[in-house]
Image (cartoon, rainbow, N blue to C red):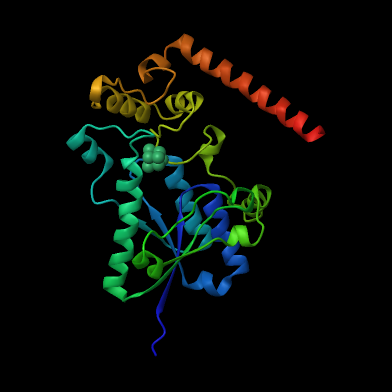
Amino acid sequence: MNKKKEYHILSLSGGKDSTALAFFMRENMPEIFKKLELVFYDTGCDLPETYNYLNKIEVFLNKKITIVEPDKSFDHIFHTSLLIPAPHRRYCTIELKVKPSWKFIYQKIKKEGEGIFYFYIGIRADESWRKGITPKNNREKALITPKYPLIENHINIYDVERILLDNGINYPDYYNWRERNGCYFCFYQKPLDWINLYEKHPELYKQAIYYEENGRKSHGEIFRWCSFGTLREMIQTDNIKKIKANSNKNKIQKYCNQKLFDTL
Ligand code: SF4
């Protein structure tokens, strides 16, 4: 009986964990690493720092990253529906990430033949409660096998840091001013992340204002990317000061809670 073809795929997000996983696999799973394909699902809306980091990963690992683009850009989807993505309407993830990943799988099958897809997912041991890939039906179950090497090898957040530093790749630059990667307009950002976006990439902030002001306001809903206020209001001098002061207070509170927790 013919052995089924195996595909080994690691989806890079442009963040620290999936990057650390790639370096971990090179070091500890060299046979699989040779066959491993690095893939980035490009929303077209990521930060310039993310694209720079991906270039750096390619150079450091000496491995090409396959860039998979969605059929329709975010801008196209926005202009045809005028709907803004939001936590209760995460079409962004479906259109820009999930559908392209299936397109990638089916194109591979068409070009290279049926097989099993091993997906290596950068979820750490200290966050193993997070959902990775869950194949939904029998067809998906037969096609996809998720793998979690960081969890299996007890790699936590401190180990991830060590892997990134030891390999000289360090963190992506956006970690200096923002807590998460993803689209520049991601609605999960905190107010301070928005202000930092305004200060680092004013042209992207301006584009986010455009989407906010032109997005459809269904059922009388007035759209806001951020609960603090509109993006235009947020960059008024007083509001910038308020947001920065609040986040400093939160940082101090978080630090005190952590210290208290450490001493218990
Ligand atoms: S990063 Fe945010 S805006 Fe972008 S696809 Fe993910 S949830 Fe949507």
Which residue is situated farthest in the top direction here?
A: 238
Give residue 32's position: percent from left, percent from top: 52, 72
Which residue is situated farthest in the front direction here?
A: 138
Q: Residue at x 51, y 57 (%)?
A: 121
Is 72 situated left or right of 9 in this image? left
* Ligand 1 image position (quadrant): top left
Give residue 115's position: percent from left, percent from top: 37, 75
Q: Residue at x 35, y 57 (%)?
A: 101
Q: Is residue 46 visible?
A: no
Most foreground residue, 113 or 136: 136
Residue 222 drawn above or below residue 50: above
- Quadrant in the picture for the N terminus: bottom left
Is 59 situated left or right of 139 in this image? right
Q: Quadrant of residue 75?
A: top left
Which residue is situated farthest in the left direction here?
A: 80
Q: Quadrant of residue 111?
A: bottom left
